[in-house]
Amino acid sequence: MADHEVTIRAAGPELAGSVYALLLDCGRDMAARGFRNWDPPPATPESIATETRAQTVLVALTGAGVVVGTATLRREPTHSYEEDERAGRVAWAAAGAAALYLNRLAVAPQGQRSGLGAALLRAAEAEARARAAAALRCDVLADNPDLVEWYRRRGYLPRGRRAHGGKDFLVLEKPLT
């Protein structure tokens, strides 16, 4: 499943169930590898449908219309960083700048390591730039060093650590300007 075999675009509410099914598959795959932060998925079909109206939910679609990847761009983080910033656990390079927050970047297990995740990330960064964001921010499970390194190779820099949902996360930021 290479980049050229899919189309990446914004999703409408009609794709919410398919996005949720993808997150279920990814959550099961991650749990089998010991990462339980998406078991159950951090969304529902209803919340995803709402997000397609208020946020940007990108999907990677095959020619047959099957959702094989997704990423969500939010204006506000899903978990506030205020307390972590006050306590000095998180310090943004682009503090005070307009930023967007990346959530749930996911690729179907059979399509992982195909370049599709990188294509979705590039699409998310392009969308963030088009929306005049100075930075794109995300949290990555600290116990997943391979994923942390994947983001670092793409220019994401560590800005601190924080806990939410009972798990430890590394906070990453990529300046876009």
Image (spheres, helix red, strand yellow):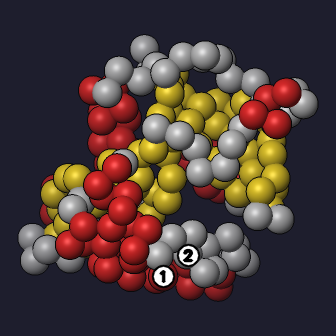
Tell me if residue 64 comes above or below residue 9 in the rendering.
below
Mark 1–mark 2 Cα distance, whole angstroms, equals 6 Å
Q: Which residue occupies the foreground of this view, 17 or 126?
A: 17
Categorize mark 2 by other alpha carbons within 10 Å: few (<14), some (14-19), many (20+).
Answer: some
Relative to 45, 99 lies left or right: right
Residue 97: quarter of image: top right
Tell me if residue 118 comes above or below residue 19 in the rendering.
above
Tell me if residue 171 comes above or below residue 12 in the rendering.
above
- Residue 2 visible in image: no
Q: Which mark is residue 88?
A: none
Residue drawn 64% across the image and 37% down it: 172
Residue drawn 63% across the image and 80% down it: 39
Asked if the residues shown at circle 1 and circle 2 are in contact, with their CB atoms under 8 angstroms apart, the answer is yes
| Amino acid type assigned to the residue bearing label 1 in the image | Leu
If the image is split into quadrants, where does the N terminus sit?
bottom left
Q: Residue furthest left?
A: 63
Tell me if residue 118 comes above or below residue 31 in the rendering.
above
Q: Position of residue 154 (x, y in %)?
A: 50, 36
If the image is split into quadrants, where does the C terminus sit?
top left
Q: Position of residue 27 (x, y in %)?
A: 56, 78
Q: Position of residue 78 (x, y in %)?
A: 59, 51
- Residue 47 visible in image: yes
Residue wearing tag 1: 24
Residue wearing tag 2: 41
Q: Helix or strand or loop: what does disc 2 sit on?
A: loop
